Amino acid sequence: MGNALALHPLERIVSEHEGWLAARVLGYAKDGGYTRYTSTLEEAWRISVAGLSASLIHALRAKEPTPGLSPDYDFAADPVTRFGIDEARRHRMRGVTLGMFLGLMKYYRRSYQDLVRCSGLDEKTLERGRLFVDCFFDRIEIGFTTEWASVSAPQRLAELEEASRSITNEKNRLLTLLESIPSPVMLLDTDGQPVFMNHEAVELLAGPMTPGTHYYRESGSPGLEVGVPRWSRLKRFLKGKAREARFEESIESSAGRRYFLVTVQRMLDISEKFCGTTIILSDFTDRKHAEDERQRLVEEMEERVRSRTAELLDVNERLVEEIEERRRSECFFHATIDSLSAPVAILNGDGDIVTVNRAWRKFADENGCRHPNHFIGDNYLGLCDNVKGKDAVTASAVARGIREVTAGRIDEFHLEYPCHGPGEQRWFQVRATRLENGSRGRVAVVHENISEVKKAQEEILSLNRSLEERIRLRTQQLECSNRELEGFCYAVSHDLRSHLARLEGLGRGLVEDCSAGLDNQARHYAERICRISMDLRRAIDSLLDLSRLARCELGNEAVDLSEVAARVAEELQRSQPLRRVSFSVEPGVIVRGDPQLLETVVRHLMGNAWKFTSRRKDAEIAFGSTMLHGMKTCFVRDNGVGFDMRYAGCLFQPFQRLHGPAEFDGAGIGLATVQRVIQRHGGRIWAEGERGEGAVFFFTFPD
Amino acid sequence: MVDAKTILLVEDNPDDEFLALRALRRHGLRDVVVARDGEQAVDQLFEAITPLDPWLVLLDLKLPKMNGLEVLRTIRSVERTRHTPVIVISSSQEESDVVQCRELGVLAYLTKPIDGEKIMALLATAGLSS
């Protein structure tokens, strides 16, 4: 009872330290060199420890006294030794000798003893535990050695053959497994020489191959025909100490270039002894191709993005420039229209107000138009159409005009209209001008304040009216006074002249009828009275002629002055046949005017020339025309007495004489008459001369 | 039938009448009937019991009651006197008077003072003589 209670702690300790025990045994086995022949799997060691511990706990729970080592005891039937005996049989079948197995068992015993010693139990219990463990292992050793000794030689051979078959089967299963792996796999020995390659690996490295050949090297044979790939990273790995390495390689195969992820791993046995290298290649060609394709697509995409970006940047730059240019033009445009004093609105082709100038906004503000945007965005035509009241007619006319302009039917429309403010009279001119060609182009609408112009026009009109009235009145007065003057002239011509004519007539009667009764002196006086009356009457006749010239109607026909001059020359010659005068008349001088008056002109000038050459024996008188200052100019030239140019201005004054009546007769009215006729024809007359050297009278007519 | 050698002188001013009669007399023309105004002239020519049928009329224009132009129109309007030679002897040379007289077919338009030689020359040119 006391034993049973005391053994409980041992059971707990053993069951809790299964792993510790396995490690301890493995440690002893390695130290003792046993692992060369035993399983390299740690798990196998743990399982054997578990089996022993279960046997030990079974013995503890049997509550029987520790069995003694008696010669009659049947150890083979002992349940405690059962596990040990089975283990020994399995080792024997793998070719382990009894000595080796017994030795190994010693290390198990030592490991359990170590556990008890280190368990921290009190000394008495510890001593009993040590004793129990020894006794336990003694029973197992006696059991399996007894069983081992009882096996016969043929039975032993049969066991070994069975074991060999089993191992061969196992090897074939593993080979099949490796062969069936779709990835290339190879194993190298500790010298780096290939000992195994699966079919995938051979075909990859050496081309198509019959399955089941060339991929397994029998122990001791010279080696596989297929060598290890000469990858530098593999070489480095084999020379180094690393447990594992992964790298990518590409291999040219019959199916084209293949890409692999190579996993190289050192194989270590349970005692961490290096026993070869595994190389596993996983094909990621498809993935690689997919990745390459993806990369290519990405690059292509990036290239496209880059080129598109460059294009867009270019376009963008141009757009920015264009925007800047437009902004500048816009600024310029706004500054331009803002600088105008007249309100301006720019309309689009639909008549919407696109923009307005400063003057427009100012006008709207000053006239109380509370519109947030100064009508920008509103439709101008719509605004016009909605005008009611007295301005409706003007507004609809303006809308009509703008529509004509936007439709392209006219280039410009303008209209004046009154727009009187509360305190002032105002007029505006609205002008719609097309800014762009074609229909639906933009239109500028300008409202110009023309009040000042209008007022000025009104003033001018009013002034004109009053002026006309004054002219009319003045004309009336002048006409009246002219009529009076004419009446007076008529009275003079008729009455005064009648009296003179009578005096003259009676004087002549006195001389002719009464000469018998008169002495010489009386007759002389009578004759002088006659002559003076006659001179006075002729003077009055000339004056009346002159005034009649100013009033008579002018004819307008072609007059051949040459013909007139020739006729007058003939008349003059006939009047004084004894005078020798050389006449020269240029033919074909034709002007337009009144035939009678122009004949008077020629007659007077030729008559003067005749008169003032009377003292010359070689008198010459010429009529002709010449070009002076770009104008056709007629002239009458003589080589008579001439005149002093200082008095040239007096020549054409009535009754102004440069020669005394004793020298040359004449009333002194002829040149005044000539000048009057020329002036009435719109022409000009002037004279050039020199005392004693003759004179030239030039006269022109307008074309 | 009235004396075909008669001259009708229409003249209101006595001095002019004297000068005219003198000038005519100097050329042997003594058969002269004088009318002192237009009405008298028309009376003599058309209204009298024995109307005057002169071979020449010397006519002043400025006359009382009925002026010389009216007298001339009347003369030209009557068949009997339509072609009677008329010499106008006026104080003035009003253009309108001259034109109208020419249109009414006067032998000449002369201004005073009366010039007997000129008249005789005109009559000679026209083939007329007493």
Image (cartoon, helix red, strand yellow):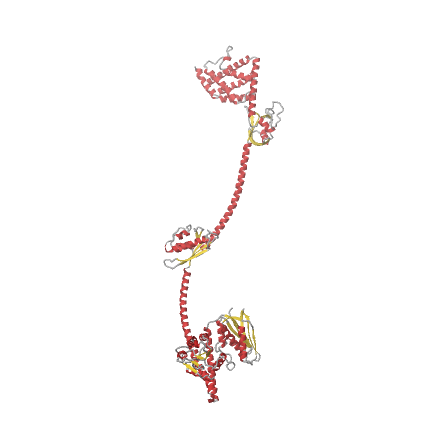
| Front residue (pair A602, A442) | A602
Vertical placement of A593 versus A274: above or below? Answer: below
Q: Position of residue A583 (x, y in %)?
A: 56, 76
| Front residue (pair A507, B103) | B103
| Front residue (pair B67, A516) | B67
Q: Position of residue A437 (x, y in %)?
A: 48, 53
Can residue A152 be seen at all in this image of the molecule? yes
Q: For residue A496, what is the image quadrant?
A: bottom left
Vertical placement of A464 versus A54: above or below? Answer: below
| Number of numbered callouts drawn | 0
In this view, the residue farthest toward the right is A222
In this view, the residue farthest toward the top is A72
The N terminus of chain A is located in which quarter?
A: top left
Vertical placement of A297 versus A387: above or below? Answer: above
Q: Position of residue A576 (x, y in %)?
A: 54, 80
Q: For residue A165, what is the image quadrant?
A: top right
In this view, the residue farthest toward the front is B1
| Front residue (pair A648, A340) | A648
Can residue A357 be seen at all in this image of the molecule? no
Vertical placement of B110 versus A440: above or below? Answer: below
Q: Position of residue A104 (x, y in %)?
A: 54, 18
